[in-house]
Image: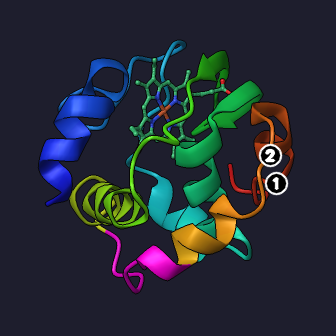
Amino acid sequence: PGAKLYSANCQSCHQATGQGIPGAFPPLTHLDKVVQAKGGREYLIRVVLYGLQGPLTVEGKTYNGVMPPFRQLKDEEVANLLNHVLATFAKSKAKPITAQEVKAQRAKPLSPQEVLKSRPPVK
Ligand code: HEM
């Protein structure tokens, strides 16, 4: 169920392969490291709900862009989308993100800059 949501909402920037565009849109292939880090699950949910802004280094490349928020997606859609990205592009075996976890982050709105500050320290 996440594949359609990905192509409709994310693929234009992060590309069909999840490899992004160097210098413009970061890849999503490293996200197993992020999801496994302390606070990483919450961070990924926040990025989708609230967007992201500011300098970010991913796999040695710096991005200083803006990702828009996707508050319009339902809790279950955010969970399905992230689980698709994690399993498909990041080959992650982390336990799936649940709609309950999304709901908990939706109750705590953040700015895109605050979302960046909550990123776990992963290169
Ligand atoms: C960053 C996922 C849609 C542009 C990120 C990150 C994630 C992500 C997880 C952070 C990576 C990290 O911290 O290592 C998604 C998902 C999307 C989506 C699941 C669909 C809901 C988009 C779209 C755009 C975009 C449509 C372009 C309009 C960006 C940019 C960054 C980013 C520019 C880096 C922001 C910065 O420089 O601070 N995305 N993204 N994303 N995304 Fe997306």
Dots 1, 2 in contact, CB < 8 A: yes
- The amino acid sitting under disc 2 is Leu
User: What is the number of callouts on the image?
Assistant: 2
* Mark 2 residue crowding within 10 angstroms, few (<14) / some (14–19) / many (20+): some
Please report the bounds of the magenta region as a residue range.
92-100
Determine the image quadrant of residue 59: top right
Give x and y (percent) for residue 12: 28, 19
Q: Is residue 63 left or right of residue 14?
A: right
**Could you tell me residue 9's position as x and y percent?**
30, 32
Kind of residue indicated by mark 1: Ser
Q: Is residue 123 above or below residue 98?
A: above
Vertical order, 35 against 70 (above or below): below
Q: Which residue sits furthest bottom?
A: 95
Magenta-span inclusion, residue 69: no
Question: Which residue bears the numbered disc 2?
Answer: 110
Q: Does the beta carbon of the residue at mark 2 sit less than 8 Å from ligand 1?
A: no
Quick one: SS at disc 1?
A: loop
From this view, report whether residue 121 is shown above or below residue 29.
below
Residue 115 on image: x %, y %:
76, 45
* Residue annotated with mark 1: 118
Gap in angstroms between the C-alphas marked 1 and 2: 10 Å
* Residue visible at 73% across and 76% down in the picture: 38
Q: Which residue: 34% across, 81% down?
A: 93
What secondary structure predominates along the stretch shown in magenta? loop
Residue 17 visible in this rendered orientation of the protein:
no
Residue at point 64%, 41% (across, down): 50
Camera-near label (1 vs 2) is 2
